[in-house]
Image (cartoon, helix red, strand yellow):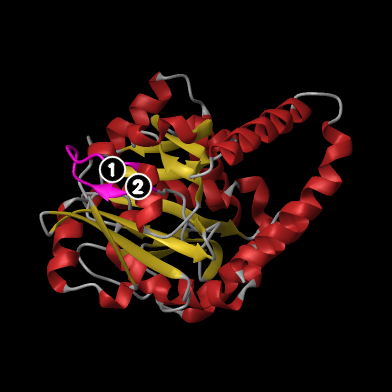
Amino acid sequence: MDVETIHPEELTTDQIDRWKAMLTPEQFRDTPFFHPQFVTTMSQFRSLIEIAIITENSTPVAFFPFERHGNVGRPLGIKLSDFQGIIRADHDIVNPQELLKGCDLKTWNFDHLIVPHQEFNHWHLKVDDSRYMDISSGYEPFLEERKESGSSLISQIQRKKRKLEREHGPLRFEWQVEDRQEFEQLLQWKSGQRKNTNTFNILQYEWVTQFLDKIRTVNSEEFAGVLSGLYLKDQLIAIHLGMRTKTVLHFWFPTYDRELSKYSPGLILNLEITKHAAEKGIQRVDLGKGNEPFKTSLGSAAILVAEGAVELNPLRHTTRSLWFQAREWIRDSRLKGLAQIPKKMIRSYRTNQQIR
């Protein structure tokens, strides 16, 4: 196994074609986060990005995009990548430690590693569900399957939609919104939501908003940004920025007008997007990791994603494992409340240093 690291702009046409050929539904490699267009677009705003090309007999067998922070590797965009891993063919297995040596890294941290990458199992510290909506049989069969599973959320959303139209007027959906002012509204609403919930706001960084602004304009058959809007008459009431490949749409940055929150316009928009995605041949809508009730109710199944780190130093791996176990114990104990304030301060500081 030979490893060469390059910057994204150095990718050749043949290498890109080889990469794209590996983006099959097996092991969920058809996610937009694994598409070379996602990597090359982000690299326009993020100089830390490199790509490791793993070759055998001079033929590329795997690609590994990462950010270099000294001798530590991190996911692209830190908080922006909802799926992480090595892009490779099914039969090609990559030794994680040999990969790190080839990249001149001592550590690679991950928090959304797709679990079917079995060679990484030893390095997992925690595994979570990343729910998705299976619309491979169409939109109506998806609705019926969810209702038969016991989910009442779809009926609630449909009832709220009728109530909203009855009390305020007709709704209009747009799959692709071109107006940049609507994108600015998304940034404003989403930042306000983060402030109100006291959660980390990645949109505070200029390079992030510039990157998202660029993604929304990318539009090819294989990969595109999708900025979708829900309107009450001519008033925007919910908006979402996601990405799609030929077969997968990723639900990424949703937000809505809080003054209409009792009607759940964000969930109404979600179903409208899903309906139109199915009509366009999309087979899966990824909702991302998280325990929000709507993901559990709307998600047909889940992709397992792991948090952890590959380490060259065995002692560091042991220390990290012990620290992680202590953290999980505190989360489940009465000490959780006391630990929240310093934990948030430390996490905020670390993230700020990594993402700038």
Amino acid tagged 2: Glu
Depicted 229 relative to depicted 331: above or below: below
Task: Say which residue label 1 marks.
Answer: 94
Element assignment for label 1: loop
Element assignment for label 2: helix
Q: Position of residue 309 (x, y in %)?
A: 52, 43
Q: Check if mark 2's residue and mark 1's residue have beta carbons within 8 Å.
A: yes
* Residue 210 visible, this angle: yes
The residue stretch that appears in magenta: 85-95
Q: Residues within 10 Å of mark 1 (few under 14, many from 20)?
A: some
Relative to 35, 187 lies left or right: right
- Decide whether residue 107 is among the magenta residues: no
Q: Report the magenta stretch's main SS.
A: loop
Q: Position of residue 194 (x, y in %)?
A: 70, 58
Labelled disc at residue 98: 2
Depicted 8 relative to depicted 197: above or below: below
* Residue 198 visible, this angle: no
What residue is rendered at 41% in x and 79% in y?
A: 44
Q: Position of residue 334 (x, y in %)?
A: 86, 25
Q: Position of residue 248 (x, y in %)?
A: 30, 49
Depth check: 140 or 58 in front? 58
Q: Residues within 10 Å of mark 2 (few under 14, many from 20)?
A: some
Outermost residue to the right: 338
Depth check: 102 or 36 in front? 102
What residue is rendered at 54% in x and 37% in y?
A: 314
Depth check: 72 or 218 in front? 72
Amino acid tagged 1: Val
Q: Gap between marks 2 and 1, in whole Å? A: 8 Å
- Decide whether residue 89 is among the magenta residues: yes
What residue is rendered at 39% in x and 44% in y?
A: 97
